Image (spheres, rainbow, N blue to C red):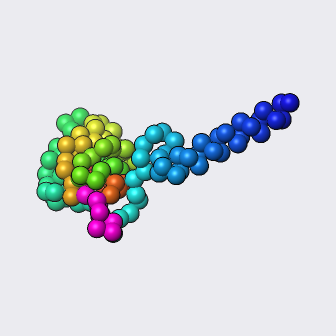
Amino acid sequence: MKTKSVVLFLIFILLAAIKMEAKNVLPGGEEEYLPMAEVMPEPVEGMAGIVKKISYPPIAKSAGMEGRVIAMAFINETGGVDDVKIIKGLGGGCNEEVEKVLRSSKFKPGINEGKPVKVKLTMSFVFKK
């Protein structure tokens, strides 16, 4: 009886996973973002425009913190930023500064087969005195 319940439970989980995959939905409920597109998203003001908006946090600067923050931005079909995840952080307020600037930025959306698509975009920002 216990084995039958476990098998039924596993079948239920498998069917739920297949249903989510068919809808192109991740388990967390987020729609899937492509890792690449024929035309990748680009900041409307260019990468230089984004870098110009980033200010070196005073705490990190006074502590002599230098390094790289790598962030993944989830760009939607209209070029808006749905989410930002810090992949490699630095601390001292640098991670938060990168996240704040990316969330407030507008992008040209990624394009596949002539249509705008959701894309994950990884970017690197260097903090150096």
Q: Main secondary structure of the magenta part?
A: strand
Residue 56 visible, this angle: no
In the shown orientation, is residue 27 left or right of residue 42? Answer: right
In the shown orientation, is residue 36 left or right of residue 54? Answer: right
Closer to the camera, 72 or 15?
A: 15
Q: Position of residue 42 (x, y in %)?
A: 23, 60
Asked where in the image residue 117 lies, by quadrant, the reply is bottom left
Closer to the camera, 121 or 27?
A: 27
Q: Residue furthest top?
A: 1
Q: Position of residue 32 (x, y in %)?
A: 43, 51
Q: Residue furthest right?
A: 1
Residue at left offset 52%, top offset 52%: 22
Residue at left offset 41%, top offset 47%: 31
Quadrant placement of the N terminus: top right
Magenta segment includes 129: no
Vertical position of residue 28 compared to residue 115: above or below: above
Residue 30 visible, this angle: yes
Residue at left offset 71%, top offset 36%: 9
Which residues lie in the magenta part?
A: 109-116
Closer to the camera, 109 or 59?
A: 109
Q: Position of residue 112 (x, y in %)?
A: 33, 66
Q: Position of residue 18 (x, y in %)?
A: 59, 49
